[in-house]
Image: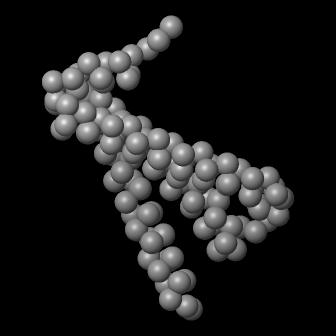
Amino acid sequence: MTLIDILQTISNFFMLVTLPIYILFLITLRIFRHDETLNSAFFKLMFSIGIADVGMIIVIMLGNTLAESGWTPEVYIFIGSLSARLSNVGLFGFGYAQNFGVFFVAINRYTAYMRPMKHNKVVEWFFSVRG
């Protein structure tokens, strides 16, 4: 067993242990979303990034790690190249969602810190529903 295999096993273990905690955190954010302290654009953005993170963890665990481990080769042989395509679409899709989410959080924090008087106006404009 190489060092890379050991590090991969450790990181997979931590992903599996922290995933339920992360999901409970997201459920808590969702339940208390109307609370005065959690009813801001920042927490809505963090919830969105959390969904993208959980999706990425699930795609990594079901797509790459499970196929690489060799525990269920029949499933991946039956699905064929579709499993690789779905895994890549999930990885890129959730990866882009994470990147956009972090970008919007950066804009949100920048306006809150550098332009506090215009922050609410920018957030309202940025997150308003246009029809």
View extreme (top): residue: 131
Residue appearing at x 50%, y 77% in the figure: 9
Residue appearing at x 45%, y 63% in the figure: 16
* Whether residue 47 is visible: no
In the rendered image, residue 39, in percent from the top left (x then y), is placed at 24, 26
Answer left or right for 64 relative to 116. right
In the rendered image, residue 51, in percent from the top left (x then y), is placed at 45, 42
Q: Quadrant of the N terminus?
A: bottom right
Q: Which residue is at the front of the view, 67 or 93?
A: 93
Answer left or right for 28 relative to 71. left
View extreme (front): residue: 114
92 over 78 or under it: above or below: above
* Whether residue 88 is visible: yes
Residue appearing at x 38%, y 22% in the figure: 127
In the rendered image, residue 8, in percent from the top left (x then y), is placed at 51, 76
Q: Quadrant of residue 105 in the image?
A: top left
In the rendered image, residue 103, in percent from the top left (x then y), is placed at 40, 42
State the scheme by which the image is colored.
one colour
Q: Quadrant of residue 122 in the image?
A: top left
Answer left or right for 15 relative to 78. left
* Count of residue discs: 0
Q: Quadrant of residue 93 in the image?
A: top right
